[in-house]
Image (cartoon, rainbow, N blue to C red):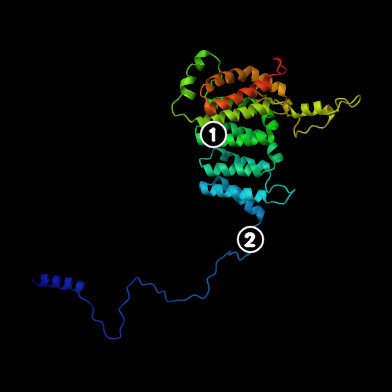
Amino acid sequence: MGSSAKKKKDKKKDFQKPKLKVGKARPKPANFTDTSFKSKAIVLNQQSISTSAPSASSQFSHHLSLVTSKNDSQRRDSLSYLTTAIATRPTNTPLQQPASILLPKILPLTLDISNGVRAQLLSLLRALPLGDIEDHVGLVSLWLRTGITHLAVAIRSSTMDMLLWAIGCFSDALVSCAGGWVKTLKALIVMQGWPMETSPQAWSSITTTTFGKPGSDTKALAKSLNTMASFVEAGLHEDRQEQEQEQSPRWGWPLNNVEQHMISRRSNCFARLNLFGPPPDEESQILEDRVDRQSVFAKRFQKPIELGLQVARQEGGDVGRASARLRKAVENGMKDYDGLDYQ
């Protein structure tokens, strides 16, 4: 009995409130921390007190590094800053970063999933000096071919806008760079869904899978045909140098053919010789002469394009008008071709 009463008494102690005396504070717990101290100053090691803003060059480099950000808004804003910085720089001053550093970082955005980023990329390319881009036209052509064969329709459409811009700015350099004529034409034909073979078996299903499909996007087809027509016109049109020679007055000896002995306007006029590069294949040839491009076009591309135009002409509307323009570009570009291989 005694032990039972003792247990009950011990349990009551847990629930009894201590009686506090008047004027005496409540006892503090064992883990109490005193926070009543006051500090007059907080010192941070290596604190920067500089009030000067970062330079324009450092800001340009910073935004150039942000074009690979995972946030599409950040990529778009960085491209917008670069565009404004390049467009508002003083006249006759070089770029904040050379094109050899700038282009390899921004051209991969050709395949960006955001429409706003791709549109801002085109604005940035338009702001760049054409001479700097023309020196790296091989890299530009590579990303253009990658974009026009992409699976996403929106990316193909944006890349076609970039290709039309390149044709309007430096068409001669675009079609005469390594692979610029053969590989780009092949990519444009693949984009249409046309086979490179001319056998009837290869073309038997084209009428039902490409153009005759119900609900197909005719605007996209018309845009791709117009883009191909512009590229064919750029590659097969008469050279400006030949036109200038025909319009210039004929001088007698020793001034006849003096234009052949002038310094070339190209930055790398002997690139076609491939003196220090790897052995080129047929598709990576540098075709600077119009006759060489006509020869390759006649052997590899003319027949597939003519077969594809026969199918496209049946659609009518925008597709029919675009196919008529492409047919006219082929006829005008090949009308003076004599069928001889000069390569």
Q: How many residues crowd mark 1 within 10 Å: few (<14), some (14–19), many (20+)? A: many
- The residue located at (64%, 22%) in the rendering is 330
Is the C-beta separation of discs 1 and 2 under 8 Å? no
Q: Which percent across, then down, holds residue 121?
A: 59, 43
Front residue of 275/1: it is 275
* Three-letter code, disc 1: Arg
| Horizontal arrangement in the rendering, residue 16 relative to residue 249 (left or right) | left
Q: Tell me the kind of residue under disc 2.
A: Ala
For label 1, the residue is 156
Name the residue tied to disc 2. 53
Discs 1/2, front? 1
Residue 79 in view? yes
- Left or right: residue 11 versus residue 199 is left
Quarter holding the C terminus?
top right
* Residue 139 appears anywhere in the view: no
Of residues 138 and 199, the one drawn nearer to the viewer in this rendering: 199
